[in-house]
Amino acid sequence: MEFLSGGDLSGLMRANALFTIPVTRFMAAEIICGLQFLHTRGIIHRDIKPANILMNSAGHLKIADFGLAVMNIFGDKKISEYAGTLRYMAPEILLRKPYNTAVDWFSAGVMIYEMATGKYPFNAGILPETIEKSLINDVPTYPKGLNPQARDLIVGLLNKSPESRQVAVDNIREHPFFMEINWTDIEGAGARPPFQLGPPPVMTLTKIDDILSSTEANKSPMAERDQQLFCGFTFANENWQVVKPIKEPFIRPRRTFGRFVRETIRRIWWKMKNWK
């Protein structure tokens, strides 16, 4: 897997409270490119949230954690499974209605609101029922100083109607909020990110030798009979070993007077039941 040393978007948001409009614009643009890439291939992520948006050392965003994703959702096809993280779930999922890729755009709208305002757009109560009710019924309030173009974008993404929401994202790249964005640069990772962490540490040959000498290199080769366990894998390292489970010792429960009485009664009852 690709090494992403920049952490996730949730950590970045906690460290910066709220983003400036240029930073929010860049982050939103990269997330939009990622979602459009997935949706054109029939993939619904279903768990878009800051913790699942990772950053590499150059400052570019990557969508991660596809454990809840579904595939082959094209055209008018819809599904109705309940899945996602409550705070970022679209109303149609909470209402157990059939849905499509529009649910990912609602989640993206929640994230963009958080980036631009530093707050959650709905009632972040302690009880799940409170959050769910707010997501279904409440309309977010917007700070007076919020950029009007950002507000218009978020309003479209947080529309309760999935059909209206989809209309809002059909031409999302042409939205006035993204007027300064060069989408070719965004797709090719050529745009300069607002956060740059610098290059990852260089792994020297000495360090690599130290790691190898302390791990795989010291293991004895895998037994021939154990290699059958890895049939079907595209790659099997001959130095892999099969770890056998440790047999747990049997611990006899402490014999107390109460347990002695119960066991005696149980034995007497069993003999009476089977008396001939």
Image (cartoon, helix red, strand yellow):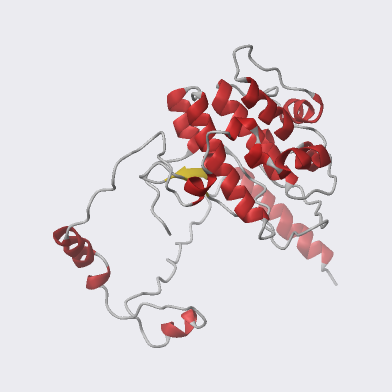
Q: Is residue 62 visible?
A: no
* Residue 212 picture quarter: bottom left
Of 10 and 266, the residue lying toward us: 10
| Residue at the image position 48 percent from the left and 22 percent from the top | 17
The outermost residue toward the top is: 144
Q: Is residue 87 visible?
A: yes
Q: Does residue 235 appear to the left or right of 164 in the view shown?
A: left
* Residue 154 picture quarter: top right
The outermost residue toward the left is: 206
Give the percent coordinates (x, y) of residue 159. 77, 32
Does 218 appear above or below 185? Answer: below
Give the percent coordinates (x, y) of residue 254. 52, 49
Q: Quadrant of the C terminus?
A: bottom right
| Residue at the image position 71 percent from the left and 47 percent from the top | 83
Number of disc labels:
0
Does 153 appear above or below 235? Answer: above
Of 138 and 272, the residue lying toward us: 138
Of 198 and 130, the residue lying toward us: 198
Q: Does residue 250 appear to the left or right of 105 in the view shown?
A: left
* Residue 140 picture quarter: top right
| Residue at the image position 82 percent from the left and 68 percent from the top | 274
Give the percent coordinates (x, y) of residue 74. 76, 59
Q: Does residue 106 appear to the left or right of 235 in the view shown?
A: right
Of 28 and 185, the residue lying toward us: 185
Q: Quadrant of the N terminus?
A: bottom left
Does 42 appear above or below 102? Answer: below
Give the percent coordinates (x, y) of residue 149. 64, 25
